[in-house]
Image: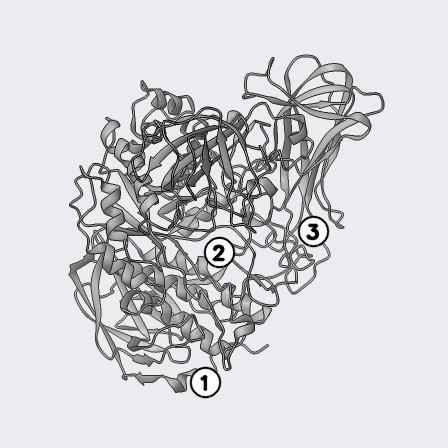
Amino acid sequence: MNSIGMRHFPWLLLLVSTIAGAQTLTFNDASVLQAHPKRIGHNVGSLSYYDNSQVFKNLLGTGNPGFEPFSIRQIWPSGDEGTRTTFVSPDSYDPVAEDYWKGAEFSIVQSQRHGAELGCSGTIAGNSRSDFRKGQGVTFTFAAPCAAATAAGDVMIVSKVTDPTPEAVWEGDRSAGSNGLAAVQIPRGGKLTSLTTGLCAACGTQSLVMDATAPGSSSGFTLYYDNLQIANTTPDIYVLHRGTYQLSFEAKITAGSPQLRTSLERLSTSSNRLRCAPFAPKLTGQWAEYTENCEAAEVGIATGDANCVAGGKTTDCTAPGPGMFTVAVTGGAVAFDNLSFRKISGQNPRNPSVFRDEVVDTLVRSGSQVLRFWGSQNGETAWNWTQPDQAMGRAYSGTGFYNEGMGEGISLNDFLVLCETVQKISGKPVVPYIELPVTLEGDDPVNLTEFLDAPAVTKYGARRAALGQTQPWTSVFSEIDLSFCNECWNFAFAGQNLPWRKNATYYGDYSERAHAIFQPIRTRDPYFPPDVIRLGIGFQTATTFQADLAIENVCGPKKDGCPDYAEINAYTSLGMSPPSMDAAWASALVEPYNNIYNPRSQTKVYQSLKDYQNLHACGPKGTSRCEVAVYEENNSTMQSCGTKCTPPARNLTQDEEDELTSGAGQGIVAALEGLLNERAGILSQAFFTLTGVYNGTSNPPDLYAKLWGDVVDMGGATENVRPQFLGVELVNHAIEGEMTDCDFTSGLPTYDYPGDPADNDQPAMDHVPWLYAFCFRSGAERSFVLINTNPLTSYTVGFAGTAAPQGTVKVMQYAPGALNLMNDSRTGSTTYLTAATVALTNSTLSSPASVTVPPHSVTAYSFRAP
């Protein structure tokens, strides 16, 4: 395959370029462009038992290690006129079974007409099935009538807590709920049930009972981790076992004289794979904790073994395969709880969080200032979300729950401890960015903010103190951002969204609900600090109309529920059908500039910024300038033209999909987008996302995209990161203090971009720079970043003005040899033996009069002013 780098680019013939012989960068140190730029953040909510989303110290902790009950909460706008005893949802594809919701609680929390049914609450007597052929959603029937008939424009929250977890769910009946177990083994009359009395002190509200009292029966289950199959391969080892690990659980006999036996191993062909000895402790009728240590010495290319070298000898490399834990009981019944398998040797004492050291180290390395928490928490209540880990139930939302459940969550406190840990280890401020659940109601909004800001003598301040944080979290962080729900406008998230509906404004239901959340936070929480906690509302970037009205609705008539900021996403390369890969990279490298400076920006980033930043309708009084946060940004090459291709447009191949989503050019795109956003006055931005290796696409024939994570593995076989991570890391190294003015006063090379209809109709734009400069100062510290997007030409840059570099200048550079180089393997092959081909380099200069930046590169310079 040809490299895309220092060679002839045919698309350059289409560009009208102005390239001067010398470039002069003039520093205007006294002119501040942005007083408080934030380092680019990360989304950290992708949690799973597979790929690099295995972020917990407890490697068995992403299912339900505390064996707690589960709940499901949904929110529905009315799809049709109902009666005093019925409510009709709009989703004709809802897979819910008939009468699943029987016994659940409901509440009518919103009414467009302000009818007498508003505030009605009670019990669900039953529900129908949906019928997509008739366009008919689910009809919920109430056990008692409301004061008036439900109507279009009403919004209902419905909640069902399955406590205790019934036997059918434990034993795998997905139609009844999600049990958090990969597989169950209950031959010859074995059973899995719940115990709710006589629990251990840390057992939460229930424990699992493995019942093998029937003659000849057994009872148990299996959990897997480090498990990912893509294109019939296991691509990588994402958790490499090295050192001492400990298996632990709490148990007691509840019947008979049972024997419990566990096994734990990696299902790999290698002799040096993890393989713990079988564990069969002698149990009693009293609760006790049982532990067994296990030594592991797996080998990856990152461990330094001479017989495991990428491109060399690989005889000692541990082959991939899933980790498997199995427990089985025979001869009686055993109550079982608080399952854990974690590394106990060589752990960082400065990391008290539930996240693995390697995950924390990666976040510290990235320099992320904003950590966004979106982990499928839309079904949470304030009470459950602030529980101790062992007592926190699984909370679900949306209609995907009925099939395979949704992503696993963590407690709010666990996330805040992660933020504090990164802040302490890095020595730099961190901003927790939290998406509030869409199903909050009643006192929940105020309870959550009091968990953050109230003293320990209050109800939720006491809950926080019981978890180990006596002082309010608002004393730990200088800023905490709270946005109301993740993409509530998105039609795809049925049962956990409030999208547009007919006879309503575009954000009508959503903005009314946001007011119901923000107004009590601002008016009823006596400890609420508006200078620390900032409230945000989300908008679809591609749809800028009616946002002004939405913000007005959120504020309310008394302007006592206003947001501080609007959040948008800023994805690039959404649809790519390029005539060549050269053209694809040309489009990718121009899009960040197009999004910020082109009034015809196809993704509507420019239009969104101009609209929202010009509003003075935000803040505590509804008169402050509205700020804008970018809650997610990354490339998003998930589709091509499919069966509608018209030459020269064409579909991508799998190799091209790999290169566009994980190629070295994306490191430059990530750096340029982040810095242009800073210059545009973005409040904060978070890369989507830290974790996640592959996603399916709509590209024929069923291609995979290397999205969305920007790491390959953390503590795995390679320790590689993707190019996007390197771009973010370099930029964050330079962002300190204030963003100051610096311009090319002579010789700025530019070109006229002709547009590209094959890249989602990327618009044309004249005088696009090849070369960019961004400058920062913090006290006497100075830094600047030069980005060269020209794939062929290097530039020599001289200096003028104030604060030109002098003395020892530290240089960090990202200069890949080609735009399509990758740090992981191509789809369909294994990554665990793949060496990184792009990396950051470090060097120093002494009082340079000029610097030369190579083609397609990002370079950061830092020095101390006299």
Return the residue at label 3: 318
82 in relation to 214, above or below: below
Circle 1: element type: helix
- Quarter in which the C terminus is drawn: bottom left
In the image, is residue 845 above or below residue 288? below
Position of 176 with respect to 510 (left or right) is: right
**For the image shown, how many numbered marks are present on the structure?**
3
Q: Is residue 260 above or below residue 404?
A: above
Q: Amino acid at mark 3?
A: Thr
**Image side of residue 517 versus residue 285, left or right:** left
Say which amino acid is labelled 2.
Answer: Asp
**Along the viewing direction, whichever of 457 and 133 lies nearer the viewer:** 133
From the viewer's perspective, is the residue at label 1 or at label 3 nearer? Answer: 1
Q: Amino acid at mark 1?
A: Pro
Rounded to the nearest whole Å, what is the CA distance between mark 2 and mark 3? Answer: 24 Å
Tell me the quarter of the picture where residue 208 sits: top right
User: Residue 83's spot in the image, x, y percent?
Assistant: 43, 34
User: Which circle marks residue 602 in the picture?
Assistant: none
What is the crowding at mark 3: few (fewer than 14 residues within 10 Å), some, or many (at least 20)? many
Judged from the image, the secondary structure of the residue bearing numbered disc 2 is: loop
Residue 62 appearing in the image: yes
**SS assignment at label 3:** loop
Graded by Cα atoms within 10 Å as few (under 14), some (14 to 19) or many (20 or more), the crowding at tag 1 reads: few
Q: As drawn, is 116 to the left or to the right of 9?
A: left
Look at the picture and state if 30 lies above or below 284.
below
Residue wearing tag 1: 10
- What distance separates the C-alpha of mark 1 from that of mark 3? 44 Å
Q: Earlier in the sequence, mark 2 or mark 3?
A: 3
Q: Residues within 10 Å of mark 2 (few under 14, many from 20)?
A: many
Residue that numbered label 2 is attached to: 710
Distance CA(mark 1)–CA(mark 2): 30 Å
